[in-house]
Structure formats: structure tokens, C-alpha cells
Amino acid sequence: MKYISFICFLLLAISCNTATTSPKNLTKITAKNIAIDSTLVADAKIDSMIAPYKEKMVSEMNRVLTKTAVDITKKAIGMQSTLGNLIADLSYEMANPIYQQKTKQNIDFAMFNSGGLRAPISAGNVTKESAFKLMPFENEFVVVELSREKIIELVNYLIQNKTAHPLSKQIQLTIINDDFDLLINGKKFDKNKNYRVLTSDYLQTGGDRMNFFKNPISLTKLNYKIRDAIIAYFEKEVELKAVIDNRIIVQ
């Protein structure tokens, strides 16, 4: 049997004066344990009121958005994963038009954290529930403008962590021991240029120790939930495709 203690304000003594108004003072607080167990009977009226909404919610969550021929997972292959690549690429595709409309500029690449992907996508039909399990958080897209120093910090973070963090295909990173060669949008990393990186509002504040996203040169909030972007992308794709390519090469 489980007990939840509800603190109830039952007795409030009020000092009253018929001639003048006096302040009200709390004089006593009592608490009572109420058992929450099988002896409590459901209210049929409440159940009947909830039922249509519950059925609608279940139906919506079971709605098929797309399909995949293979499991798409976070299993690391080198420093990539099929799930990480898919999420980074679809995020860029769905967010860049919004950023363009706001700023007349393009995002350079997208980066997220592997830990933010909470469930794989199993082979077969992909439902709306699959998207919620994959991304249960309310995180939104933001774009940070980073200096060359911050980009180097970002790359060193990847090298040191050796984790398959989602990185979009606009990046081609070759890691050679503790050194690296970096191409962004097919061009060699320019140390005199700032770069615009798509990420989440959680990571932008230093989540998962990604402190290089903090205090950017500029910050643009897209007011677009990552989960909403995932659902919208799934809905427009007949079948999901996720590949391991040359975006990160470890020599």
C-alpha cells in the first residue's frame, strides 16, 4: 500500500474585533494520510467523460507516419550512428528554411547530442508514438553563430569524447590522432570566418558539457520544437533512409 501525504489547511483561527478589522493569523495546521489503493473505486461518470479523449489520443499516437526497412539506432559505427545521422540531417532540412526566412542566411551545419535520442526506430511502420519515444522532450531549435575558436572547441569535444553525436552531412571531419582536417559545406575550415550551427536550446546553455555553444556571437531562436520537426519530416517521407557516410572519418 502506498500513501501520499496531503497537507490540508483545515483550521484557520481568525481574530475578529467587531469594532475594527484585525489581521488574519494562521494558528493551526493538521495533516492526514489518505490511502491510495485498490479500495478506491473509479468514478464511472469521470471515466465516461475521459473515454472519447483517451480514444482520440491513442488513435493519434498509433497513426502511421512513414516506414523503414531496417532498424535505425544509436549503435556507433566509428563515430557515427544511423539514428544520429538521420536526426541531424532532417533537423537541418526542416530548420534551415525557417532560419533563411528570419535572417536571409543559411545554417552551416547541425549538431546535437547522442543522449538526447531516447529510443531507436524499429523496422516497419513508424508511428507518431515512435517520434514521441525518440524525442520526449520539449526542446526547440536554436542557431548559434560561433567564432573559429568555438568551432575548434566543438571539434576537440568530438575528438575527446569519441561519441557518435548527431552531426549533419554538411560536415566532413577527418580525425588523425589528436589533430583534424575539417571541411564545412565542401570548403576547408576558414579560421577567419564565423559559422552558424543548428542545435537545441538545451545544448546551447551548456547541456551535456557542450560549453562551446554558450555565449555565442549571436543567437537565433526558431520557436520550432525538434519533435515537431521530426514528425513533419516523417510525414513527408515515404520511407526513412539513414546511412553511414564520410562525415566523420577516424584514421
Image (cartoon, grey):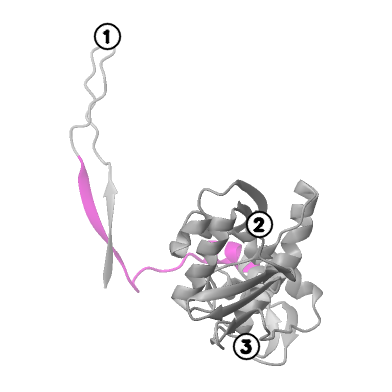
Q: Position of residue 74 (x, y in %)?
A: 55, 83
Q: Which residue is at 70% across, 84% downward?
A: 242
Q: Nearer the viewer, mark 1 or mark 3?
A: 3
Q: Find disc 2 in the rendering and name its residue.
A: 195
Structural crowding at the residue carrying mark 2, measured as other residues with C-alpha within 10 Å and reported as few (<14), some (14–19) or many (≥20): many
What's under tag 3, amino acid-wise? Ser
Label 3 or label 2, whichever comes before in sequence order: 3
Q: Which residue is at 57% across, 61% downward?
A: 151
**Res 166 visible:** no
From this view, report whether residue 120 is shown above or below residue 59: below
**Res 179 visible:** yes
Verify whether residue 202 appears in magenta. no
The residue closer to the viewer here, 101 or 216, is 216
Q: Which residue is at 22% across, 29% downward?
A: 13
Mark 2 touching mark 1, by CB under 8 A? Answer: no
Q: Find disc 3 in the rendering and name its residue.
A: 122
Structural crowding at the residue carrying mark 3, measured as other residues with C-alpha within 10 Å and reported as few (<14), some (14–19) or many (≥20): some
Q: Quadrant of the C terminus?
A: bottom right
Left of 156 or right of it: where is 132? right
Mark 1 touching mark 3, by CB under 8 A? Answer: no
Q: Which residue is at 54% across, 68% downward?
A: 155
The residue closer to the viewer here, 60 or 109, is 109
Q: Find disc 1 in the rendering and name its residue.
A: 20
Left of 124 or right of it: where is 210? left
Quadrant for residue 62, please give it: bottom right
Q: Secondary structure at mark 3?
A: loop
Gap between marks 3 and 2 measured at Cα: 35 Å
Over which residues does the magenta segment extend?
A: 29-52
What's under tag 2, amino acid-wise? Tyr
Q: Position of residue 1 (x, y in %)?
A: 26, 73
